[in-house]
Amino acid sequence: MKSTIFHPFHVAAGAKMVSFAGFEMPIQYPTGILEEHRIVRTGVGVFDVSHMGEFEIRGDDALALIQKITINDASKLEPGKAQYSAMCYPNGGIVDDLLVYHRGDHYMLVVNGANVDKDLAWVMENAASFANVTVTDRSEETHLLAVQGPRSIDTLQKLTDAALADVAYYSFVDGTLAGVPMILSRTGYTGELGFELYFRGDATVAATVVNAIFDAGKEYGIAWIGLGARDTLRLEKGYCLYGNDIDQTTNPIEAGLGWITKLAKGTFNASDVIANVKAAGPTRKLVGFVMLTEKLLPRQGYEIVSNGDVVGKVTSGNTSPGLNIGIGIGYVRADLAAPGTQIEIKARGTTFPAEVRKMPFL
């Protein structure tokens, strides 16, 4: 397994380490997932997400390439703006969900860590049909910390001259923090106020940034946050996780990603397939649900049942620390997707009552 440059900090903090996306990553710290979740919702927490991948796209055909491979409309991006998007195979299956950054003279794609090699190969395959574009993988040299929570700006503003309160959601600035040059991006996958910090440098640079952030956030109870709380936080907001809720077998329309699918921009990979699914209506839809009993915590792979028939499967499930009950996401027949629909989750040889709810849960 690989390790991020912040690995020594996780070990020193007593993290339970697991294999994730080819890296040894912290799943939780001694305080536990519920407390880590609370810290992010009420204070400020720090996630090591350096396993994510970053690709630079340069050249006169950079935008044309991005328009071909992504489903959102990158032509709407201005320098200093980021965009949530996804890439699809020709059959409409999702290659990955990602962020597109307009860096001024080039673009940056940020992809899921488990998909870096696959995504890079897909981008390079598509780039081959363009005369003037270069794709560079910057994943190994780029460090990424997500500082999330209502006290995140209070923490980070002590360390930078950038006016963080003026940075809009899905916008970013180039600046310095603790004297280190970096991208300060008003993004994150927790549903809370927060920034993602992209920077490069050796272990000394990494230690400088970490120590400065933790010193600045000490008065707000800052703490490292692991993958466990990252999952409960994103699940409460109904955010998709690649490999669970979306993958090569799902298309954007049935996955509820129609809002980032811009068919009007012109032809792109799978645009014809996606248009047909949209016109005909998907046969299944990704929905959120809450358990109506405390006797079962829903988990990925559990069957979803209605009137004795299996109508889908749970793709993500966990406890909601905010609601204090089990919540989940899964695909069901399209006629069962309306909020308020009663369903059942099958486990341990029996079924447990649940109800479809509109996402986000909180």
Image: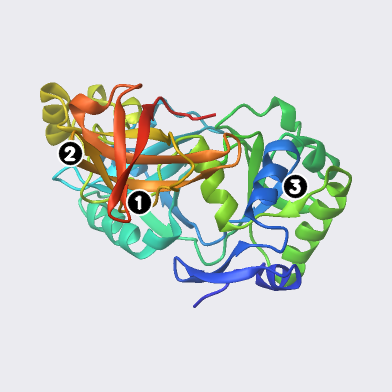
- Residue 216, given in percent of the width and then of the height, sits at 86, 48
Residue 137 location (% of width, % of height): 44, 61
Q: Look at the picture and state if 167 lies above or below 143.
A: above
Residue 285 on image: x %, y %: 25, 33
Quadrant of the rendered image containing residue 161: top right
Nearer the observer, disc 2 or disc 3? 2
Residue at position x 62%, y 36% in the image: 186
Mark 2: amino acid: Gly
Residue on which disc 3 sits:
176
Q: Amino acid at mark 3?
A: Thr
Q: Quickly name the residue at label 2.
A: 308
Q: Of callouts 2 and 3, which one flags the residue occurring earlier in the amino acid sequence?
A: 3
Front residue of 285/146: it is 285
Which amino acid type is marked by label 1?
Asn
Q: What's the CA distance linking mark 2 and mark 1? A: 25 Å
- Residue 244 is marked as 1
Location of residue 48 in the rendering, given as x and y in whole percent from the top left corner = 62, 58
| 98 lies left or right of 213 | left
Which callout, 2 or 1, points at the residue further toward the start of the chain? 1
Work out how far the residue at label 2 is from the one at label 3, CA to CA, in angstroms: 59 Å
Residue 175 can be seen in this image: no
The residue at the far bottom in this view is 1
- Nearer the observer, 132 or 256: 256
Picture residue at 45% right of the left edge, 35% below the top? 238
231 or 248, which lies in front? 231
Seen in the image, is 86 located left or right of residue 49? left
